[in-house]
Image (cartoon, rainbow, N blue to C red):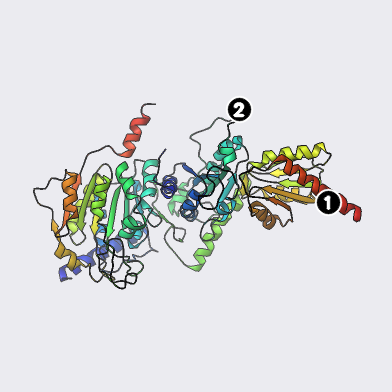
Amino acid sequence: MSLLQKRRVLESFERARATKARKHRDSLPTWCPGCGHFTPLQGLYEAMETLKIPVKDFVLVSGIGCSGRFPFFVRGFGLHALHGRAIPVATGVKLANPDLQVVVVGGDGDGVGIGGGHLPHAARSNFDITYLLLDNAIYGLTKGQTSPTSPMGMVSGTSPYGNISKPLNASTLALAYGATFVARVFSQERDQVTEMITKAIAHKGFSFLHVLSPCVEFHKTVTYESVKEEVCLLPADYNANDRAEALVLAESAEPVYTGLFLEEKSPSYHERVAEITSKF
Amino acid sequence: MLQAEDEIAASGAVLGAGFAGKRAMTSTSGPGLSLMSEMINMGVMSEIPMVIANVQRGGPSTGLPTKVEQSDLNIALYGGAGDSPRIVMAASSNRECYTGIQLAFDLAEKYQTPVIFLSDLFLGQRTVINTIERKIDRNRSTRVVPTNGDLRVYNRFQDTETGVSPWLIPGEEGALYSVTGLEHSETGNPNFAADVHLKMTDKRFRKFEAMKADLPTPRVFGDEDADIGLTCWGSPVGAVFEGMEIARETGVKSKMITSIMINPQPEEFFQAFFDSCRKIIIPEMNHQGQYAALMKSRYLIRPVEMHFPGVKQVSPRQVADKIIEVHHELTAEAASA
């Protein structure tokens, strides 16, 4: 990590601590210094500021994992739900009160591992929620086991001879499932993360943000350096309106594209419900 | 209505809606309740109201999807990790399904805890004509709303005398909080200290003591002076009542107590009833005698158990024969004494 990167990470860490401390005094951040999750946390603060979301109307739902502690660091209402079940719970919150701004945070194990069965249905139903999938390609909270997005060959306690299953690509999945907003960002790029979180929250319908968020403590191969080598911004002339083209770009491994893959306008689930109920 | 992708998602959406302050329920049968167990536990821990109706069928596993049994009492009462108290109700008639589920919502909202509402295939697939005397107030609320005083330093899980904390709903002004399935302090933030766990566990159970004031009085049928008492739950109540009538025609008196509330139960009524009986018979439709086990541990009684797996409903004749048999035993005992 360069000095500048280290400084940025530490800055995020300090800001997160300060913001959190205003709300809760008995719950300190559990993340390791340098964790990729600090950038999206900071991005979320800035997005809330930009979009002027009243804290009383903001609900953050999370699953289990390092990312699961998100709600305790954010001013708003928080629901730290079960492993893999943040999406259905968030769906219930949103349908019960569509005035609430609902954001879901989960990791790769949470979102495409144990909870992988919920993503397609949230996407196809176009619930008006934002999903931040913080992908560190490892089970970090439990000290580094192979996850569904871990690269092949990765050695860990659960794959001592190297991972022999192919990794899932969360962005491709979201596109295939019909999400109406799909973007990928790298957590080292703070401005990109903030901009995309803001766009994702502002989007009406199911918005999916795939955050490449390295685990500095346990991942030996997917690191800030390795991800930085791989990533590349989407071509400047790319229009995020063609799902087939988006799928090809999202699937690309060399380079790994970051940016907005797709944004579609489509009525969200609760709007469709309101359309039906208005007939009675 | 939301058609979810699976039972986990269905119960999750109910929990989410409960968190947002709306009354919500889901329904399932047999193995679906197993899938919902984790979410029900989360409801217990994070004190969110949920109503889950389980129309019982035969089990275990996929079991007997189109046949009746009363074998989900144990999972309803105990199905979940940790010390996990929950309200369990069981309707014994279609009318009770209608009125009971309203009570389920009232209790869930007031005491901020999941309710498992048991029905079974026998009730679920029966068509009856009922006159409904109660108009539903769709906007009614039993929520304990925080006062301005509570909001000065708001703790979502404030430890009160009854264990019920004033509940601010997301979207309302005054305070912010997070809830979690982790053990937490009164603020709602994770906290694993021994004293906190002790206090919060006690709080979650104390609500069930306070709830007793809101429980309906159990129904008692038959001859008050009878030596033989019966207790049962769910759909066999009707058959048992008929069995008592048959036995009565042969001159054998009996009485029965039943309540829609399985947990918590208006215990003083049950205790007084059992104290007034020389013999207690408990008929039910499962192999283990799940209700009998509960009654034995709760009231320290030694009942005559009458339990067998389902498919066939408890028949009035079986009940009548058992009542008469027990009556003969009592007479013989009296003669030898």
Mark 2 closeness class: few <14, some 14–19, many ≥20 residues within 10 Å: few
Q: Nearer the viewer, residue B175 or B38?
A: B38
SS of the residue under disc 1 = helix
Chain where mark 2 sits: B
Label 1 – label 2 distance at C-alpha: 43 Å
- In the rendered view, does A96 fall on the left or right side of B118? left
Spot occupied by residue B86 in the image (x, y as percentages of width and height): 55, 52
Q: Which mark is residue B7?
A: none
Q: Which of the image's four quarters has the C terminus of chain A?
A: top left
Displayed quadrant of residue A192: bottom left
Residue B142: give x, y in percent of width and height.
52, 42
Q: How many marks?
A: 2
Dot 2 falls on a residue whose secondary structure is loop
Q: The disc labelled 2 sits on which kind of residue?
A: Thr
Q: Classify 10 Å Cα crowding around label 1: few (below 14), some (14-19), many (20 and above).
A: few
Is residue B90 among the parts visible in the rendering? yes
Residue B225 higher or lower than A230, as above or below? above
Q: Nearer the viewer, mark 1 or mark 2?
A: 1
Q: Are marks 1 and 2 on the same chain?
A: yes
Q: B254 and A272: which one is in front?
A: B254
Q: Nearer the viewer, residue A68 or A54?
A: A68
* Left/right of residue B20 with respect to residue A133 in the rendered view: right
Q: Position of residue A196 (x, y in %)?
A: 20, 51
Is mark 1 in CB contact (under 8 Å) with mark 2? no
Q: Position of residue B144 (x, y in %)?
A: 51, 45
**Is residue B133 shown above or below B186?**
above
Q: Which residue is mark 2?
A: B131
Q: Looking at the image, can residue B172 be seen?
A: no
- Chain of the residue on which disc 1 is drawn: B
In the rendered structure, the answer to whether residue B253 lies left or right of residue A194 reads right
Q: Which residue is mark 1?
A: B329
**Quarter of the image that includes the N terminus of chain A:** bottom left
